[in-house]
Image: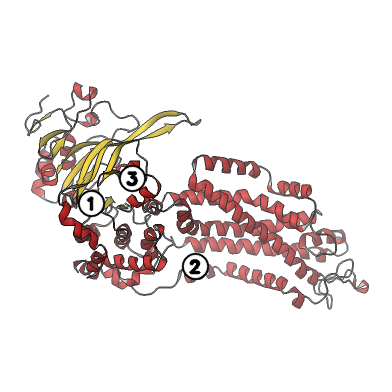
Amino acid sequence: MAIQQATAVTGRRTALQGVFGQADILQVNGIGKTFPIRDMLGRRKGGVSAVDGVSFALPKQGTLGIVGESGCGKSTLARLLMRLIEPDRGEVNYEGTNLLSLKGTAMKKARTKMQMVFQNPYSSLDPQMSVLDNVAFPLLANGAGKTQARERAHHYLDAVGLSRAHADRLPGSLSGGQRQRVAIARALILEPDIVIADEAVSALDKSVQAQVLNLFQELKRELSLSLIFISHDLHVVEYMSDEVMVMYLGRVVEKGPTARVFGAAAHPYTKALLASAPSVDIAERATAVSEEEGALKGDLPSPLNPPSGCRFRTRCPHAMARCAEEAPALRELAPGHTAACFLLVGDTPALSGTPAI
Amino acid sequence: MSIQATAAGDPQALASARREPSRAALVFAAFARRKVALAALLVLLVIVLACLLAPWVAPYDPSAGEVTDRLLKLGAPGHILGTDEQGRDILSRVLYGGRLSLLSGVLPVLLAGIIGGGLGIAAGYFGGWTNTIIMRALDIVFSFPAILLAIGISAALGPGITNIIISATVVFIPPIARIAESAVKEVRKEEFIEAARSSGAGALLIIRAHVLRNIFAKVFVFATSLIGVCLMVASGLSFLGLGVSPPTPEWGFMLNNLKQLIFINPAVTIVPGAFIFLTSLSLNLVSDALSDALELKR
């Protein structure tokens, strides 16, 4: 019922739903960021290549999952999209306008269309502000009156399943799951079209995770949201996403429909990632271990000095001379399924049998 | 509807729906657990109230001496704290003098809190060059020993209570700014600042709504601890003759005046000093307990 009230508020969007159908709501082209490293005198002496030439499209009302190890640039990518960090290059097209070219009021307006749920529910809510005011704040920042903002905040707290009794309390007295619900309510109050969830459930217990994931699914359906779901947890991403993008050291290595990427992973990194994911199914676990890729060895190389050519080559069991010389481009293996590896040709992953080295 | 079902399935949500004590009550409860701090607060309240109400509480006129009652000892009939070399009642002078002393202890810290806090917030929030310019400039002031700087400024400006307040303010701006800056830097790292930015809030709104609230406790507690120090600095300046002019009572000045009697009437000479000490100590105890009490909830 609460949700229906919330949908009544956002009825505008539901009306649009049928018109656009499958169109992409967000198109990202070659976005990148290198953080400069400066010496004591402020001279530039190098850079950390955090995100490098990432492109993707988010279908309207679709869910894009982004996976990768910690430090692969997932969170930086989210912040680049939100312009919390200013990208060096590339463009972010939201319904035809490049967000990166917007300034001042236009940017402020566009910002409300894309909102983010942060990783740590203990840091993403102001501990000195009541739950209600935390949720109402984005509306106040966009010029709404206090009473009106609070009224709306109550709506959205209802929508995420928190009662009125929670509203006046400080976040400190809520559990992690409840806090994350508050954070979700805050992200929704500006009626965004796109919600970016950056490791939004990683800090939660498994049982609470499930509740919050289902909440995301329900809200997405009710409010016709498009979702970018960032996580290092493969199971979570598999559960949530229509499409998956796998990142390694700031670059996209594989991208495609969820079933395809999880069922017929092509890139050696994706395979290794899948093999190293814990499984509750004993039979599945046995096959995973027997797989030749096995778990990943070693650590992520430093993005301060990334490997030349293919960035995965230092940990890749199939690395060859060519991998150090040039970076493989993403090539299409099947409709919508692309991966960046020299060993992959057309629809027949060359890695399936004996390694072609 | 299904969403409400999830909420109903969350037993914690229902159990914690009860009304709980306010934050202020929690902080006071934590504070009151320290008996020493509670006693210090009581002493402080008595001193402050007695000084504020001096015209009604004080038994004598602070500047009218009785020649026959000169140099009475502690506990003399009618003059509990004795009399000075002009036969003026010390208790009355201490109470009247306390008004000026407390003012010169509190006002500089308040002013420095506003100025230093503002500078620290600007430096901490905007970072980069703003930070470098503000903090390095304050470092220059900070590099002088506090007392020496206060004496220097007071000497340059000339004697008088206003100048004492000005010089003490200058001395206390850098430490407060430094505390505020580091507190802001810490708050700025929190994700709720990023959330606020991504909702389109400007720097001023974020500072007003999020930053001030979150650094207030830290800066406030630090400032309270400075009041005691400031009281001593101001009294010290008065003691050195940079403060009030003769008939006006003031603790530091009285101490200076009475020091000549140290061999005649030692107990009486330390009375103003004892008040400075007691007030300063109580303030420190209170601020110490307050910082512990506030740190409770995070």
Mark 1 nearby-residue class (10 Å; few <14, some 14–19, many ≥20)? many
Residue lying at 71% horizontally and 53% vertically, measured from the top left: B166
SS at mark 3 in the image? helix
> Residue B132: percent from the left, percent from the top?
54, 40
Q: Which residue is mark 2?
A: B27
The answer to whether residue A244 is left or right of residue B17 is left
Residue at image location 64% in from the left, 64% down from the top: B282
Q: Quadrant of residue A329?
A: top left
Q: CA distance from mark 3 to mark 1?
A: 15 Å
Disc 1 marks a residue whose amino acid type is: Leu
Q: Residue at x 65, y 44 (%)?
A: B141
The quadrant of the image that shows the C terminus of chain B is bottom left
Query: Between marks 2 and 1, how big is the CA–CA gap?
Result: 42 Å
> Which mark's residue is nearer the viewer, 2 or 3?
3
Asked whether the beta carbons under mark 2 and mark 3 sit within 8 Å of each other, the answer is: no
Residue A79 disc label: 3
What is the number of callouts on the image?
Answer: 3
CA gap between label 2 and label 3 equals: 37 Å
Position above or below: B268 against A300: below
**What's the colour scheme?**
secondary structure
User: Label 1 belongs to which residue?
Assistant: A227
